[in-house]
Image: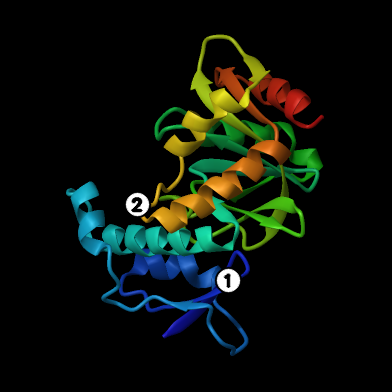
């Protein structure tokens, strides 16, 4: 059994395939200790993952299964997963969320180029863990970071979130709570368990209160990164 430090939790699991094993290497614990959770090889929920991804390989199914279990456990610790690409500039994290294929990673790639002199890097390119800690929200890198495996094992204060839509022109506007909720729920795990759902709702309520969220309509020109940063960094 291997143990991994992921978003302030010690998780035990044994990867069978290389995808999960390679993604998880930077999170291996170097010190022995008591795990917060152990995920056994026969952990529940695998059939549901198979049903949702019938064309996936066994390797990908293992990766998705362990990720789903981790983020479900994470809900119990004032946390949630946001399907997004999280970029760090000036030691602050900005998360860009959208359906797969819209271009969130393409947009954050613009930030890497345009703000290289400000130390820009990707914290997690697919599913950062967002958690309330000491009264503030932070984003964490996790092993569950998409096919390109782009993540950093650290926590960074979350400055803002933007939901991305494709457009020929660039614009960004602040969203109301009513506008945020359906977008946010679409891009996170929605547990069927009532207790977990109540915990998630409580975390989301605090997230909406503390972290500004925007609708970013953009093309893939460098100007899109500057327009977004100017608004979101205030």
Distance from label 1 to label 2 (Cα)?
Answer: 23 Å
Label total for image: 2
Residue at image position (57%, 55%) is 79
| Image quadrant where residue 204 sits | top right
Q: Position of residue 193 (x, y in %)?
A: 37, 56
| Tag of residue 190 | none
Report if the CB atoms under discs 1 and 2 are less than 8 Å apart. no
Residue at image position (63%, 23%) is 176
Q: Position of residue 83 (x, y in %)?
A: 48, 43
| Image quadrant where residue 169 sits | top right
**SS for callout 1:** strand
> Which residue position holds label 2?
192
Q: Is residue 147 above or below residue 32?
A: above
Residue most extreme to the bottom: 32
- Tell me if mark 2 has few (under 14), some (14-19) or many (20+) residues whose alpha carbon lies within 10 angstroms of its own: few
> Which residue position holds label 1?
9
Relative side of 136 to 101, left or right: right
Relative side of 48 to 216, left or right: left
Residue at image position (50%, 21%) is 165
Relative side of 45 to 90, left or right: left
**SS for callout 2:** loop
Q: Position of residue 5 (x, y in %)?
A: 58, 73
């Amino acid at each position: 059994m291997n143990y991994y430090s992921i978003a302030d939790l010690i998780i035990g699991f044994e990867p069978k395939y290389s995808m999960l094993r390679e993604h998880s290497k930077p999170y291996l614990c170097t010190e022995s200790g008591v795990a917060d959770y152990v995920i056994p090889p026969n952990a529940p929920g695998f059939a549901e993952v198979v049903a949702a991804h019938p064309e996936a390989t066994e390797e990908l199914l293992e990766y998705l299964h362990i990720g789903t279990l981790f983020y479900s456990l994470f809900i119990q610790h004032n946390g949630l997963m946001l399907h997004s690409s999280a970029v760090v500039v000036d030691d602050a994290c900005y998360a860009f969320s959208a359906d797969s294929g819209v271009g969130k990673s393409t947009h954050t790639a613009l930030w890497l180029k345009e703000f290289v002199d400000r130390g820009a890097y990707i914290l997690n390119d697919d599913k950062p863990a967002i958690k309330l800690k000491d009264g503030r929200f932070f984003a964490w890198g996790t092993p569950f970071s998409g096919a390109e495996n782009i993540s950093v094992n650290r926590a960074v204060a979350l400055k803002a979130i933007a939901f991305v839509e494709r457009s020929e022109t660039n614009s960004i506007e602040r969203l109301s709570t009513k506008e945020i909720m359906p977008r946010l729920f679409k891009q996170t795990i929605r547990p069927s368990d009532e207790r977990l759902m109540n915990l998630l709702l409580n975390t989301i309520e605090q997230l909406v209160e503390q972290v500004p969220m925007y609708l970013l309509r953009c093309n893939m020109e460098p100007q899109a990164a500057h327009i977004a940063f100017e608004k979101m960094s205030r």
